[in-house]
Amino acid sequence: MEAENNPLNKYPSLKGKFDFLKSQQDYHENLYIEIISTNGNNVVLIDHFVIGILKRSLDLVNSFIILINNWHFTVSATILRMQIDNLIRIFYSTKRSDKEFYMEFYKGKSFRELKHIDGKPLIDSLLIKISKDTYPWIEDVYRETSKYLHLSNKHFNTTITSIGDNKMTNFFGIGQPNCREEDLSNLLDAFSCTTDAIIKIVQGWIITKNSYNNN
């Protein structure tokens, strides 16, 4: 992509946020090493679940950076929605210690086919409800990014470059190079915040696993 079309060249103030995302990407590998090396490489059932989410998160961070660098704002928002999906699932699952829950998942059942301890299916609305006391912002981010995941007015609004005299001007091409700095900044913040929450849950799981094995 030509230099003048790169978001960092247009909005240099965003460099720190890009750098932070890249540091989060690098940190995923450190967490993976910690998980598999705990207590003599003793990898337990829940570890495989956590590693799976960590790997998906790593790929999403990498993809998000590539997409933002190429002005793919609407597609990047769907990547954020997928990272929210990671967060609500790992937040819930690391609180479950019953092996049957994980085995059913490994056998191919989707989360909505699995059951909460009260017997209710683990649909997204329930996972959001369980998560939002810890992450008060998660419901709003989930709702707004879902509008990018499914066809909505968001996809039409991003093509409009100006409105006046009963006439609209549209941009048609790859990406959204007309994206405002404020919108990019908010998207970067939301993605970093969601990823940081996942990282902290994984760190918490490593601490919990060590405490189990040291007792």
Image (cartoon, grey):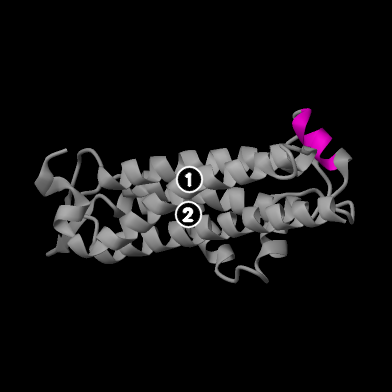
Is 182 within the magenta? no
Badge 2 marks a residue whose secondary structure is helix
The amino acid marked with disc number 1 is: Leu
Q: Give the quadrant of the N terminus.
A: top left
- Range covered by the magenta-colored residues: 101-107
Based on the picture, tell me whether residue 104 belongs to the magenta stretch: yes
Image position, residue 194 (x, y; %): 52, 58
Residue at image point 15% right, 56% down? 10
The percent position of residue 86, horizontal first and vertical second, equals: 60, 48
* Residue under pointer 1: 149
Taking the view exactly as shown, the residue that stands out farthest to the front is: 40
In which quadrant will I find the C terminus?
bottom right
Q: Which mark is residue 104?
A: none
Asked whether the beta carbons under mark 1 and mark 2 sit within 8 Å of each other, the answer is: yes
Label ID, residue 145:
2
Magenta residues: mostly which secondary structure?
A: helix
Mark 1, secondary structure of its residue = helix
Horizontal side, residue 172 vs residue 115: left or right:
left
**Of the pair 206 and 201, the residue shown nearer to us:** 206
x, y (%) of residue 156? 32, 50
Mark 2 residue type = Thr
Q: Residue at x 86, y 41 (%)?
A: 99
Q: Is residue 204 left or right of residue 100?
A: left
Q: Residue furthest top?
A: 107
Question: Which one is in front, 46 or 151?
Answer: 46
